[in-house]
Amino acid sequence: MQEKREIVRATGVVSSATLMSRVLGLIRDMVISGYFGAGMATDAFFIAFTIPNLLRRLLGEGSLTVSFIPVYTEYLTHQPQEAPRVIHVTTTIITLLLLILTIMGIVLTPWIIKFQAFGWKDPSLIKLTILLTRICFPYLFFIGLVALAMGILNSQRHFAAPALAPCLLNISIIASVLLLAPRVNPPVLTLALGVFLGGITQLLLQLPFLHARGITFKIDLDLHHPALRRIALMMAPMMVGIAAFQFNQVINRFLASFLPQGSISYLYYADRIFEFPLGLFAIALGVAVLPSFSRLVAEGRTEEFKEEVNFALRMILFITIPAMVGLIILRVPILNLIFQHGAFTYHSTTMSAQALLFYSLSIWAFGGINVLSRAFYALEDAKTPVKVAITALVTNFLLGVVLMHPLRHAGLALANSLSAMLNVVLLAHFFHRKTAGLRWGELSVSILKIVLAVIPMSLVVLLIERGYTWKESGDYAVKIPLLAGGIIAGMFLFFLCSHLLGNKELRFLREVLRVRRTR
């Protein structure tokens, strides 16, 4: 029960910070869509930012944080006197690695862009993308160190500062566009400058919190330290697995480069909406569970570990299934309200909505991947998620090639969702085979109750979608109350029906909130 409460508490902290970040992210994307629309400039920036952002996920919080936490947690539990040196050695090596990769990335940018946007033939577009990428690339160095700070702080049960870091990236981009766009030629350069400044500010935010916990940094090049070796052994296969998982987006953009201009931007804007509920709870829960999973494994509490995995899966389904239904029904109203202004037209809204429809089908799958992959990492088994991720990557590519012709960019979104579903099914299969840890009966009952509670919610949300044309820009005095009221009413109905159905996850959330109020 204590670990469950700690997971929910940590998830609440990360979710709150993530909500702030996602709201700022939507404001950022509203600024981008208003200034630049969906065309050549945005295609160039989204490709440029994809490269360092992919490497950040690959080397940063993707593999570094996840491989560092179980090892560092074990040292904190069994050898606390050696834990500071683990930080010194890891920080020294990671800083050098990030510096080398950043310099190589800047030098090799033309070849990287040629691979990423192979279908592009316009020399001016390619030249602009290379310039934007070189400005964005140092972001990798700063955000990689942020990821290491995240691993240290999360291991010590501090989640707020790392979770708040993305807010500073969004603020930097927004400020750069609003303050510099009228003065810079071409204006899209301000987006890359915002990314560069965002990396610096995110790192600076972590330093006071590390200092408050007595964390020090010293140069230590001991390549033979056992902790470094264990981290490296976990990172190597994990990087392959995460690369396979993240390369789904690279594949989508690669294939979209052969489609009509704007396709990359349609996928981007749809993905931004898709990631809002995903990041708000699913990714937040994934971040929160790893320290708890690692602690239970380190202390040999195997049955409790398996129980927490099942609890996390039920919680993720409790949130993501209604979010999936809501996004499918409200995809056009949401895109119309948030993005349709300035250079972003109704045509851009409908094109992005096609992609959002198919992206939304897999919210529950991505949530399950975040939980189950971290369960394997807590067991220091990175090979299984790697094999599964590679299988899903190949599936995504093959399905993308097949579906992009009849469905265009929407087919790429559907391929991405189907591969994610395959990924989570395989992870669940191998986790159960490895630990006999999944309670299929409990999961089935929970899913049934969630689906029953979603039905009345979906009817209310559908009335909102049908109650307005959602074609024209503006008219926010009507749109905002209508959409917000519909979402709130739908959530109320879902929670009410969950209460009447006796959903365990809702009961537990109420118990945690009751305990917090009495403290």
Image: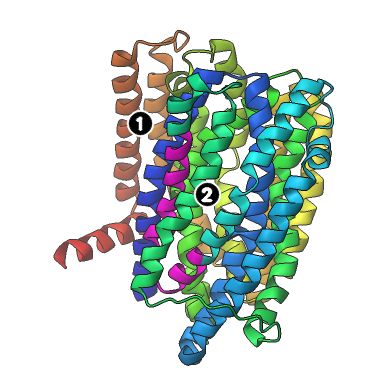
The C terminus lies in which quarter of the figure?
bottom left
Residue at mark 2: 199
Residue 205 sits in quarter: bottom left
- Residue 50 falls left or right of residue 445: right
Identity of the residue drawn at 29% across and 27% down:
485
**What range of the chain is rendered magenta?**
149-173
Horizontal and vertical percent for residue 52? 66, 47
Q: Residues within 10 Å of mark 2 (few under 14, many from 20)?
A: many
Residue 239 sits in quarter: bottom right
Horizontal and vertical percent for residue 271? 58, 35
Residue at mark 1: 487
Q: Are marks 2 and 1 in contact (CB under 8 Å)?
A: no
- Residue 421: tell me if it is visible: no
Identity of the residue drawn at 64% across and 22% down:
41
Q: Residue 327 or 193: which is nearer the viewer?
A: 193
Based on the picture, tell me whether residue 152 belongs to the magenta stretch: yes
Q: Look at label 1 and name its amino acid.
A: Ile
Q: Residue 388 or 67: which is nearer the viewer?
A: 67
Identity of the residue drawn at 35% across and 56% down:
12
Secondary structure beneath dot 1 equals: helix
Residue 171 sits in quarter: top left
Mark positioned earlier in the residue sequence (2 or 1): 2
Whether residue 357 is situated above or below residue 366 in the rendered picture: above
Whether residue 168 is situated above or below residue 72 in the rendered picture: above
Q: Look at label 2 and name its amino acid.
A: Gly
Whether residue 418 is situated above or below residue 333 in the rendered picture: below
**Which of label 2 and label 1 is nearer to you?**
2
Q: Residue 66 or 222: which is nearer the viewer?
A: 222
Residue farthest to the front? 183
- Residue 76: tell me if it is visible: yes
